[in-house]
Image: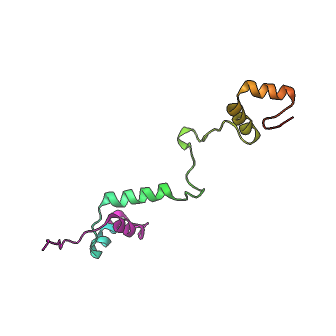
Amino acid sequence: MPKTSTKKTNTRGAAAAFVRTMPDAPASGVIAAAAKQGIKVGTSLVYSTRAYDRRTQGKNGAGRARGAGRGGRGRRRAGSGAEAQFKSLLVTIGVERARRAARRGRFVGERV
């Protein structure tokens, strides 16, 4: 018969979930409360779980500002709207072909 372990194991997810139930408590308070519940939690787990939650907070559009470390400029885009479409067209069909089509007044996909 195989030997089974009687040691009670704790999954990291359960400990992290417990840490999330006490977001404003100091780390030492969370550790003490977890010990009473029989969950092994260390300070590193408390701090890393809270840091992860801060990073992923509001990922559906309201996250932290991009580019804050670069003077707050954020990420610049090559163009938007019609300009971006035009640049994409140039890359797709080539500059010379686009010039010839513009001189003739014809556009890509148009048949005479």
Quadrant in the picture for residue 70: top right
Q: Is residue 28 left or right of residue 92?
A: left
Q: Dominant secondary structure of the magenta stretch?
A: loop
Question: Residue at the spot x=25%, y=69% of the render?
Answer: 9
Q: Is residue 51 above or below residue 73?
A: below
Across and down, in percent, residue 12 comes to 33, 64
The segment highlighted magenta reads 1-28
Quadrant in the picture for residue 48: bottom left
Across and down, in percent, residue 18 comes to 37, 70
Question: Residue at the spot x=46%, y=59% of the render?
Answer: 53
Instruction: Give yes or no for residue 24 being in the magenta stretch.
Output: yes
Q: Nearer the viewer, residue 28 or 112?
A: 112
Q: Is residue 24 above or below residue 61?
A: below
Across and down, in percent, residue 41 comes to 30, 65
Q: Is residue 99 above or below residue 45?
A: above
Q: Is residue 23 left or right of residue 66?
A: left
Quadrant in the picture for residue 61: bottom right
What coloring was used for the rendering? rainbow
